[in-house]
Image (cartoon, grey):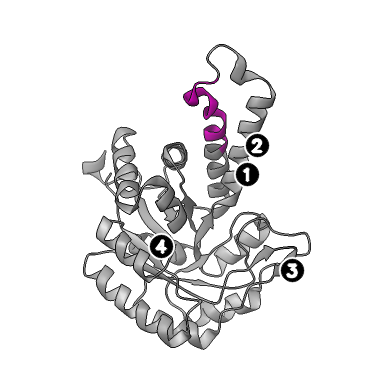
């Protein structure tokens, strides 16, 4: 199956009270692991690159072609969305030009009027090419130098204005954090999520999905979250499995130093992590039409 945009997939997910996983890729191993997990479970999946990962991998065009070629070589039959994660204005335009099927324009750090105006521009440019658009209102928190930023709660009125631009899904800050969650994290603000869900028709996106307790993830999905972003959890799983391989001295056994062998445990760990988290989301299996059988 070729790459698809995410509009109908995520609209169906919100209506059906389940979510679709959005997993960041960093290289070929990550891509194969994510695709392999989705194919085994027969569920749609979103593969995304951050601006930094795209630069590391050689640019948006290379990333798009890598994912598309890997889908073909692995005979992937489930729907796959190629998405830009947290792109600025220039990055969103570059990803659209490179053939991504979905882009996130993250203008939350701009004055709201500018965020709104540039979101409108990206929506017009993307929709003209059949590409879906995600926007953000309210910052996603994080930790720096031991100081915990809870994350700005999205303003409901601003969220309504952003949704009115015609975006396909909306990321809104509800206390979620990128990276590892600290012990004193207060949890998601479900009261704000409910306020947003009451007035926003588009599927909602939960960033910083790695580390949020399963019960909170499931509750957020029941309230309108249809896209769950995961990155750190896969990175930690990859690092742990790779460390164990080396500490066991397996890289010194025969040709254990061969990158294909060295990276295999970490790749398997990513695949297992993706499958586990998809299980939390209740993602509906793909129903193939007759010509796809």
Label 1 or label 3, whichever lies nearer to me, is 1
Local secondary structure at mark 1: helix
Label 3 residue SS: loop
Tell me if label 2 and label 1 are in contact, CB under 8 Å: yes
The residues tagged by marks 2 and 1 sit, at their Cα atoms, a distance apart of 6 Å
User: Magenta segment: does it hold 261?
Assistant: yes
Query: Visible in this render: residue 156?
Result: yes
Say which quarter of the image contains residue 193.
bottom right
Q: Give, as a single range, the part of the protein colored magenta.
A: 257-269
- Horizontal side of residue 203 vs 102, given as left or right: right
Nearer to us: label 2 or label 3 = 2
| Quarter of the figure with residue 247 | top right
Secondary structure type for disc 2: helix
User: For the residues marked 4 and 3, what is the alpha-carbon distance in whole angstroms?
Assistant: 28 Å
Instruction: Say if 266 sits above or below 163 in the image.
Output: above
- Mark 4 or mark 1: name the one nearer the start of the chain: 4
Q: Nearer the viewer, residue 239 or 167?
A: 239
Location of mark 4 (residue): 10
Residues at marks 1 and 3 touching, judged by CB atoms closer than 8 Å: no
**Residue 28 against residue 54 in the figure, above or below:** above
Identify the element where label 4 is drawn: helix
Q: Nearer the viewer, mark 4 or mark 2?
A: 2
Work out whether mark 1 precedes mark 3 in sequence or the reverse, and give the earlier one. 3
Query: Which-is-in-front pick, marks 4 and 1?
Result: 1
In the rendered image, which residue does mark 2 sit on?
240
Q: Position of residue 38 (x, y in %)?
A: 44, 43
- Dot 3 crowding, Cα within 10 Å, few <14, some 14–19, many 20+: few
Q: Could you tell me if residue 46 is visible in this image?
A: no
Q: Which residue is mark 3?
A: 186
């Amino acid at each position: 199956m070729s790459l698809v945009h995410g509009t109908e997939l995520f609209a169906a997910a919100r209506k059906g009270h389940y979510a679709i996983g959005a997993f960041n890729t960093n290289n070929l191993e990550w891509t194969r692991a994510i695709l392999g997990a989705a194919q085994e479970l027969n569920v749609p999946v979103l593969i995304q690159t951050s601006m930094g990962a795209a630069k590391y991998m050689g640019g948006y065009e290379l990333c798009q072609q890598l994912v598309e070629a890997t889908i073909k070589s692995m005979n992937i039959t489930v729907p796959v969305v190629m998405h830009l994660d947290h792109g600025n204005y220039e990055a969103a335009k570059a990803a659209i030009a490179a053939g991504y099927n979905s882009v996130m324009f993250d203008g939350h750090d701009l004055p709201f009027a500018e965020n709104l105006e540039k979101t409108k521009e990206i929506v017009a440019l993307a929709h003209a090419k059949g590409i879906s658009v995600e926007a953000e209102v309210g910052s996603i928190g994080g930790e720096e130098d031991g100081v915990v930023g809870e994350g700005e709660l999205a303003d409901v009125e601003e969220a309504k204005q952003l949704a009115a631009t015609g975006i396909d899904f909306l990321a809104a800050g509800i206390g979620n954090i990128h990276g590892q969650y600290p012990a004193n994290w207060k949890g998601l603000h479900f009261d704000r999520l409910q306020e947003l869900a009451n007035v926003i028709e588009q599927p909602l996106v939960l960033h910083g999905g790695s580390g949020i307790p399963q019960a909170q993830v499931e509750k957020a999905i029941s309230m309108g979250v249809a896209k769950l972003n995961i990155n750190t959890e896969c990175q930690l799983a990859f690092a742990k499995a790779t460390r164990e391989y080396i500490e066991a001295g397996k890289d010194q056994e025969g040709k254990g130093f061969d990158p294909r062998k060295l990276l295999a445990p970490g790749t398997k760990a990513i695949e297992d992590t993706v499958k586990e988290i998809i299980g939390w989301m209740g993602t509906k299996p793909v129903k193939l039409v007759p010509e796809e059988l």
